[in-house]
Image (cartoon, rainbow, N blue to C red):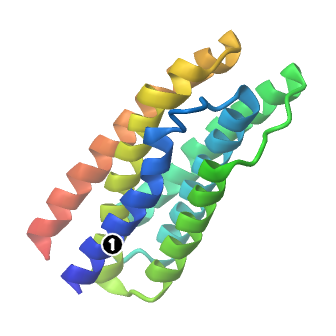
């Protein structure tokens, strides 16, 4: 089981690496960045909803609820901004890869129960938030042309850092219990 969790996280990390690497030949446009942001948040909202219902420990269920609440708020801010700017998010290879990776993660998690679910969910959350932070720092923030879009990304970044640290803490704490 442990091997399967680590293998799955490695596959997910590779899929998410598209964000961090960006398209070096061509930087993402603001509409593409908007699609990446909305998709990345939705993927974590979906996983958080699953953790709320399938999590074994209260801590994982609570963390799942926090992911739903926080990422829904970020998506509302992003949607409000793109509406104000009259920008339509543009699907791209990265946003599509995120969606596919999120769907695969959900399918994987749905096959797990108890402490195995919690461990896999938290391992994914650590990998996911680290990769999204790398993408924000290396690709999304530097390539956002619109100052309001860039400001939104900079504003929400600390929440992603807090989520990463919280997931790492839960991973370490629950690892000691099990």
Residue found at x 78% / y 35%: 79
Q: Say whether residue 4 is left or right of residue 79.
A: left
Q: Say whether residue 89 is left or right of residue 146.
A: right
User: Is 63 rendered above or below residue 158?
Assistant: below
Identify the element where label 1 is drawn: helix
Q: How many marks?
A: 1
The image quarter in which residue 100 lies: bottom right
Q: Is residue 49 visible?
A: yes
**Percent position of residue 47, x then y:** 52, 65
User: Is 155 rendered above or below residue 132?
Assistant: above
* Residue farthest along the right direction in this orientation: 86
**Percent position of residue 57, x then y:** 32, 72
The image quarter in which residue 75 lies: top right
Q: Is residue 57 visible?
A: no
Depth check, front residue: 33 or 54: 33
Residue found at x 67% / y 20%: 149
Mark 1 lies on residue? 120
Depth check, front residue: 35 or 44: 35
Depth check, front residue: 73 or 92: 92
* Residue farthest along the left direction in this orientation: 176
**Percent position of residue 87, x then y:** 85, 28
Residue found at x 50% / y 43%: 19
Residue found at x 25% / y 72%: 6
**Percent position of residue 96, x then y:** 66, 57
Q: Residues within 10 Å of mark 1 (few under 14, many from 20)?
A: many
């Amino acid at each position: 089981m442990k091997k399967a969790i680590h293998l799955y996280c490695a596959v997910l990390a590779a899929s998410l690496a598209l964000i961090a690497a960006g398209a070096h030949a061509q930087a993402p446009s603001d509409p593409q960045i908007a699609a990446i942001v909305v998709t990345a948040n939705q993927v974590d909202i979906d996983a958080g909803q699953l953790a709320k219902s399938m999590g074994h420990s209260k801590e994982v269920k609570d963390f799942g609820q926090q992911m739903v609440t926080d990422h829904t708020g970020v998506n509302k801010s992003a949607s409000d901004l793109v509406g104000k700017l009259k920008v339509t998010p543009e699907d791209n290879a990265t946003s599509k890869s995120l969606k596919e990776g999120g769907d695969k993660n959900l399918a994987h998690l749905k096959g797990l129960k108890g402490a195995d679910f919690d461990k896999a969910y938290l391992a994914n959350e650590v990998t996911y938030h680290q990769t999204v932070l790398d993408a924000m720092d290396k690709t999304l923030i530097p390539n956002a042309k619109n100052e309001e879009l860039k400001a939104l990304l900079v504003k929400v970044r600390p929440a992603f850092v807090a989520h990463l640290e919280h997931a790492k803490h839960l991973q370490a704490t629950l690892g000691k219990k099990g």
